[in-house]
Amino acid sequence: MPDLAGSVAERQAHLEAIASEVESCRLCPLHLTRRRGVPGSGPASAILMAVGEAPGEREDQDGLPFVGAAGQLLTELLAGIGLGRQDIFITNVLKSRPPGNRDPLPEEVLACAGYLDRQIAAIDPKVILVLGRHALQRLVPDAPWISRCHGQLMQVSERTYMPCYHPAAALYNGSLKAVLVEDFQRLRRHLDQLDPPRSDPAADTSPAAPPRAEQLGLF
Ligand code: SF4
């Protein structure tokens, strides 16, 4: 069950403690090559989390997630559905940059898993936006290829996920931007349907979710 104990202020303090741990983390060899750990940013009260793959060069330099070209597109996509970056919590599977932006190694994902798990538990978001195949493999390991499930809500245990292509993919393949725009519109419609709102968690009477990934097919 999610760790819902405590006020928003207490959960924000928990996120800040995780961030501090990330900044001094040496659990995998990426600490040897990174400049800064990139724990993530956003409010503990966010109803939406976005989880990408790993920091890139700009993120490694600034210590903030999604601040490079892909981050600019993410900001644009969020603005298109009436959200600002300050409304959501943005992070990655890996909190340190792999050299040359190579793919994450399984042992790195495993070493870093606790940070993301604890962030999700602290925030308890209504929806987790899963950006790209590496994040999908980490969060919904039995999901189909992202080309087959993007834009669809998926439920695993008590969590609701929406896989999308990583914004970086649209920088290389322009046709994917229209797909992302459409998927973000679906996300907007789902957020609009949420009832009760996040501010009243005690009134959430949602039925128990199945244990395996299930495409909800709401759209
Ligand atoms: S990637 Fe994760 S586990 Fe590896 S050093 Fe960075 S914070 Fe630690």
Image: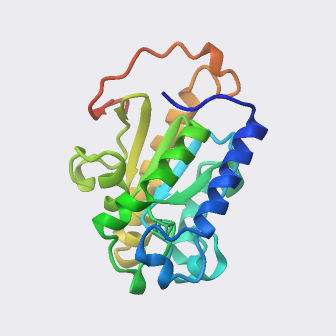
The answer to which image quadrant residue 166 occupies is bottom left
Furthest residue in direction right, as rendered:
9
Q: Residue at x 45, y 42 (%)?
A: 186
Q: Residue at x 37, y 62 (%)?
A: 109
**Nearer-the-camera pick, 134 or 74:** 134
**Nearer-the-camera pick, 192 or 36:** 36
Question: How many labels sit on residues?
Answer: 0
Q: Is residue 84 among what the camera can see?
A: no
Furthest residue in direction front, as rendered:
26
Please give left or right for residue 179 compared with residue 13 in the image. left
Q: Position of residue 206 (x, y in %)?
A: 48, 16
Q: How is the image coloured?
A: rainbow
Q: Position of residue 63 (x, y in %)?
A: 64, 73
Q: Where 88 sits versus 61, above or below?
A: above
The quadrant of the rendering that contains the C terminus is top left
Q: Position of residue 113 (x, y in %)?
A: 42, 54
The answer to which image quadrant residue 123 occupies is top right
Q: Residue at x 55, y 35 (%)?
A: 191
Q: Where 56 sits versus 203, above or below?
A: below
Q: Residue at x 42, y 14 (%)?
A: 207
Q: Where 10 sits versus 204, above or below?
A: below
**Nearer-the-camera pick, 53 or 84:** 53
Q: Is residue 128 among what the camera can see?
A: yes
Q: Position of residue 163 (x, y in %)?
A: 37, 49
